[in-house]
Amino acid sequence: MLVFRRQQGESFMVGDSVEVRILEISRGQVKIGVVAPREVAIYRSEIAHLNRQAAIGDTNDPRVQRALTAVQKTLAGKKD
Amino acid sequence: MEETFPAALPFPPGVLHFPEGLPGFENLTDFTLLQEEQLLPIVFLVSVSEPRISFPAVPVQQLRPHYELQLGEEDRLLLGLDEAEAAAGNLLCLAILNLGEGTQPATANLFAPLVVNPKNWTAKQVIQFDSSHSTAAEV
């Protein structure tokens, strides 16, 4: 395994076509940006990950209901 | 042949068919578009085969009135659209909402909207490769 260090704002290339950017480092989390051609599957796995996060198991869960109502209020406010 | 539906609801009731499923849920191909008047503009995609799984979503235009959708030829054909229909821009376009956990704010995935052909209710999550839209846009 190749190991090296990068600072926030720096990037590195994987092959000729994939650039990985270290966008932000804070509180034990790293925000990474990937610039890659469309055929690179990373996009699809990221979207799958996001979809799994967004899926709701129980729409009647009070926490879900509270979150939905909050979003609905924000969006209704935007219309004015 | 226009169907009538309650005027308050933005879309007629129906079942969306995703021939390829959703990324992460490839086995779920059919979703009822559930709309409750008190939660609009939020709508829900409820899986037909696994009704416990649902996704909240918002019409993209609600968040970005000038959103420009990129639709490649492969996606256009999968949705059953001819070039004129794809160019007309009257496709239904929904952004999945991520409600966040705890104190995290809700976000919308504008990078990969759900695009629906309103004529046959065929749908696909279409990745906007060449856009700067966020997968977690502030709502």
Image: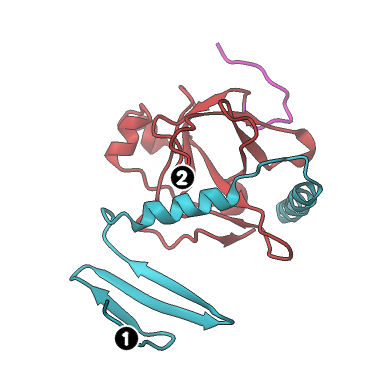
Near mark 1 (Cα within 10 A), the count class, few <14, some 14-19 or many ≥20, is few
Q: Nearer the viewer, residue B41 or A69?
A: A69
Q: Is residue B2 magenta?
A: yes
Colour assignment, chain B: red
Q: Which residue occupies 56% across, 54% down?
A: B64
Q: Is residue A47 magenta?
A: no
* Whether residue B60 can be seen here: no
The secondary element bearing badge 2 is classed as loop
Amino acid marked by disc 1 = Phe
Q: How many marks?
A: 2
Near mark 2 (Cα within 10 A), the count class, few <14, some 14-19 or many ≥20, is some
**Quarter that holds the N terminus of chain B:** top right
The secondary element bearing badge 1 is classed as loop
Q: Which residue occupies 40% across, 71% down?
A: A33
**Image quarter of residue B105:** bottom right
Q: Which mark is residue B24?
A: 2
Q: Nearer the viewer, residue B101 or B96?
A: B101
**Image quarter of residue A28:** bottom right
Chain appearing in cyan on the rendered image: A
Q: Which mark is residue B115?
A: none
* Pointer 1 residue: A4
Residue B112 screen position, x and y as percent = 46, 50
Q: Which residue occupies 74% across, 56% down?
A: A74
Label 1, label 2: how far apart the Cα atoms are? 31 Å
* Whether residue B23 can be seen here: yes
Residue B108 screen position, x and y as percent = 58, 54
* Segment tinted magenta in the rendering: B1-11
Residue A66 screen position, x and y as percent = 80, 51
Amino acid marked by disc 2 = Gly
Q: Nearer the viewer, residue B99 or B78?
A: B99
In this rendering, the answer to whether A28 lies above or below A61 is below
Residue B62 left/right relative to B38: left
